[in-house]
Amino acid sequence: MIEVQLGATLRSKAGGRTSFPVEASNIKQLLDRLGEAYPELTPVLERGVSVAIDGKLYRDSWLQPVPDGAEVFLMPRVAGG
């Protein structure tokens, strides 16, 4: 089981909740299962999020493994320019 933490700007989209338990082995499963279990997050997930696993940021790394007990944070994507 993984406890997913939400960045401050995503919390308002989740009714103020700060974390969600999810059973997943990679980033794609994590996002899919999070959206299935908590539909209020679906619009945010569809717009795109960045995922930090144990302090390392991943973007579009769908098959990146997420080890049990990892520290996982979701944040809005950061656009560069």
Image (spheres, grey):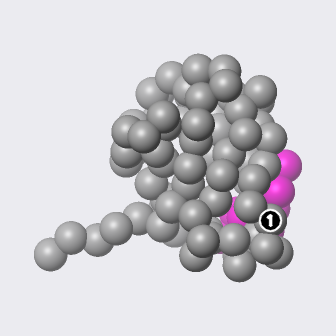
**Above or below — where is 72 with respect to 8?**
above
The answer to whether residue 36 shows anywhere in this view is no
State the image coordinates of residue 9 (x, y, percent, origin top left): 58, 76
- The residue beneath circle 1 is 17
Amino acid type assigned to the residue bearing label 1 in the image: Arg
- Please identify the quadrant where the C terminus is shown: bottom left
Taking the image as shown, residue 11 lies to the left or right of residue 26, namely right
Verify whether residue 32 appears in magenta. no
Is 32 on the left-hand or right-hand side of 66? right
Crowd around label 1: few <14 · some 14–19 · many ≥20 (10 Å): few
Q: In this view, does 60 lie above or below 17?
A: above
* SS at badge 1: loop
Total number of numbered discs in the rendering: 1
Q: Is residue 4 above or below residue 77?
A: above
What residue is rendered at 48% in x and 47% in y? 51
Q: Which residues are drawn in magenta?
A: 36-43
**Res 12 seen here:** yes
Who is closer to the viewer here, 81 or 20? 20
Tell me where residue 12 appears, x and y as whole percent: 71, 79
Q: In which quarter of the image is the N terminus?
A: top right
Magenta stretch: helix, strand or loop mostly: helix
Q: Where's residue 73, x and y in %? A: 56, 49
Q: Where is residue 13 in the image (x, y as percent from the top left)?
A: 71, 76
Q: Which of 79 and 20 is in front in this view?
A: 20
> Is residue 5 placed above or below 15 in the rendered structure?
above
Q: Residue at point 65% right, 38% down?
A: 30
| The furthest residue to the left | 81
Q: Residue at x 58, y 41 (%)?
A: 72
